[in-house]
Amino acid sequence: MNSLKVRVLGVVAAVAASISVAVPAAMSQSAAIRIDGSSTVFPLTEAAAEGFTKATGGKTRVTVGVSGTGGGFKKFCRGETDISNASRPIKSSEIAACKKAGIKFIEIPVAYDGLTVVINKQNTWAKNLTPAELKKIWEPAAQGKIKNWNQVRAGFPNVPLRLFAPGTASGTFDYFTEAINGKSGSSRGDVTSSEDDNVLVNGVIRDKGALSYFGYAYYEENKSKLQAATINGVPPTEANIRSGKYTPLSRPIFIYVSAKSANKPQVKQFVEYYIKNAPAINKKLLM
């Protein structure tokens, strides 16, 4: 976490140094900040937005949408948003789209997240899985073939395997497929997918043989209703995620700030508030 903190503070210092506009004590009621992107980063950004609105007396309206990391970057690179939430680094194709539109940006890591592999509460056999088994389940070659838990490991029961996955515009989908299948976007297609993590949670809750993955914060919110599988015996805890012990599913998550928007007093103030309060907000969300 210390290396992340250094990176964050360095970026904030650079932002502050590059902006000479003084932030007024009171801003116009029409001041607004537009944010969209990752569902994983959404809870953190939403909490920051609520805290910022309260701290500034409601003078700035902050809207936070959820269209997935990829969907958020599309809007960001069209100049439709000031800030983009991202659960993965921006892709070269997205950088090219932003460059073509004249959108320059600042990348700011805001926290570490652990992709959590979740199973139904009644699942007594898959409490520990390996990356190789996850690949066997999720790789493209598994489509239409690996349909039962007893095909995943000898000794697993004859129970249908039901898969729920983040949508293809999700940074979580990109990261998981790269970490497990070796290539971003490489995955079987015969799954129930959604950009809404609540759909994935409810899918796992309803089906004994269900399996899914999403950000750690969503697991924490729903851990009374489902359970997390350990990966190679390592559980997804805050300490394991921060230390990197929870591998290969630990990752930094980001916000991307439009350089043009960073010259707006309200955006500069919000970003500084966000970075200053991100550790406390993240800890509160995980409590």
Image (cartoon, helix red, strand yellow):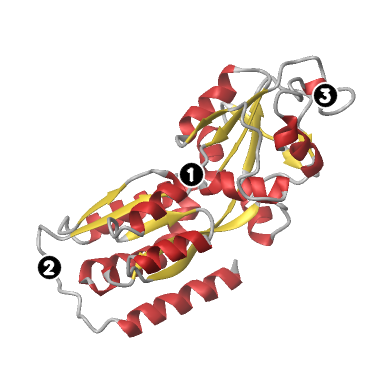
Q: Pointer 3: what residue?
A: 151
Q: Which mark is residue 47?
A: none
Q: Which of marks 2 and 1 is in front?
A: 1
The CA distance from mark 3 to mark 2 is 62 Å
Q: In this view, does 167 lie above or below 81?
A: above
Residue 240 coordinates in the image, percent (x, y): 68, 54
Q: Which residue lies furthest to the front in this view?
A: 100
Earlier-in-chain disc, 2 versus 1: 2
Mark 1 Cα within 10 Å, few/some/many (few <14, many 20+)?
A: many
Q: Residues within 10 Å of mark 2 (few under 14, many from 20)?
A: few
Q: Give the residue furthest to the top.
A: 158
Q: Nearer the viewer, mark 1 or mark 3?
A: 1
Q: Is residue 242 left or right of residue 47?
A: right
Q: Is residue 85 above or below residue 270?
A: above
SS class of the residue under badge 3?
A: helix
Q: Name the residue under label 1.
A: 169
Q: Judge whether 120 appears above or below 51 on screen.
A: above
SS for dot 1: loop
- Tell me residue 221's x, y (percent): 50, 37
Q: In which quarter of the image is residue 243?
A: bottom right
In the depicted view, which residue is nearer to us: 184 or 206? 184
Marks 1 and 3 in Cβ contact (< 8 Å):
no
Q: Residue at x 72, y 45 (%)?
A: 181
- At 60% from the left edge and 66% from the top edge, which residue is drawn? 1
Q: Residues within 10 Å of mark 3 (few under 14, many from 20)?
A: some
Q: Is residue 90 visible?
A: no
Earlier along the polypeptide chain: callout 3 or callout 2? Answer: 2
Amino acid type, residue under disc 1 in the picture: Ala
Disc on the earlier residue, 1 or 3: 3
Displayed quadrant of residue 232: top right
* Residue under pointer 2: 26
Q: What residue type is labelled 3?
A: Gln
